[in-house]
Image (cartoon, helix red, strand yellow):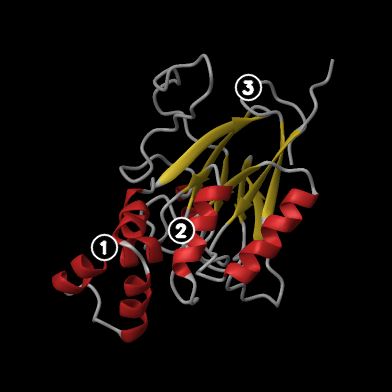
Amino acid sequence: MAHALDRIAVISDVHGNVTALEAVLADIEARGITRILNLGDVVGKGPRGAEAIKRTREACEVTVRGNWDSLIGDWEGFVTRGDVPRFEAGQWTRDELTDEDAAWLVSLPNAYDLVMSGKRIRLFHASQTSEFVRVRWEHTMDEFRGMFTNTDFTGPWAPAVPGHPSDAWPEGTTPDVVGYGDIHGAYLEADEGLLLFNAGAVGNHLDGPTAPYCILEGVTDSFVPQSFS
């Protein structure tokens, strides 16, 4: 008997734009989707960072850390080290947050792994190297292949699947589906049996006035190859 397909929404780059976030959350709810994964950059650029954090924590099952989350969450550290100047917009964004908000941003994971319809999926903000290393939609094959590798930043591919310990996967297992955000432009690329997608940017999309997001559809926690999109 075929399993009913599960749907998981993947959003990214809210950037303090709560108006866009609420529109996307309403659309997700209207589609009957209850699981939401967030690819980071909750704050920065937009004016409502604290509220964006609040709504993200309420609505999203998992949020990975984006470059702006790292920057604003550890603002004084970045400024003191000389990594960034004390620019006014960054200072204002940090001042709008509570210390608890900032600590939450810093605590976010680098990446998140899951399995769906036999697909090994990994999600992160920008690349397998760092939330600060960008892979644009125009990239080399080496950059494409690199997105599917395990690194010190991602760790080994190790989804939390009920009934399976986190170290149950053969050493060297890597994802065959990777999703990310960061570049503010949604796209999908398949090559060499690998699938790379970008979820676009809810709060600061560069391809038009819409607030895009992605939907993963398949059988959650299933290692059996079956319908997936």
For the residues labelled 3 and 1, the Cα–Cα distance comes to 39 Å
How much space separates mark 3 and mark 2, taking CA atoms?
A: 26 Å
Mark nearer the N terminus (3 vs 2): 2
Contact, mark 3 vs mark 2 (Cβ under 8 Å): no
Instruction: Provide residue 135's location: percent of width, then percent of height.
Output: 48, 62
| Location of mark 2 (residue) | 126
Q: SS at mark 2?
A: loop
Q: Name the residue at 36% across, 58% down.
A: 101
Which badge, 3 or 1, is on the more N-terminal residue? 1
First along the sequence among labels 1 and 2: 1
Few, some or many residues within 10 Å of mark 1 (<14, 14–19, 20+): some
Residue at x 65% of width, y 23% of height: 222
Q: Quadrant of residue 171?
A: top left
The reply to whether residue 129 is in sight is yes
Q: Do the residues labelled 1 and 2 touch (CB within 8 Å)?
A: no
Q: Is mark 3 on a helix, strand or loop?
A: loop
Residue found at x 66% / y 61%: 187
Vertical placement of residue 30 versus 14, above or below: above
Who is closer to the viewer here, 87 or 167?
87
What amino acid is found at the position of numbered circle 1 in the picture? Asp
* Residue beneath disc 3: 223
Q: Is residue 80 left or right of residue 1?
A: left
Helix, strand or loop at mark 1: loop
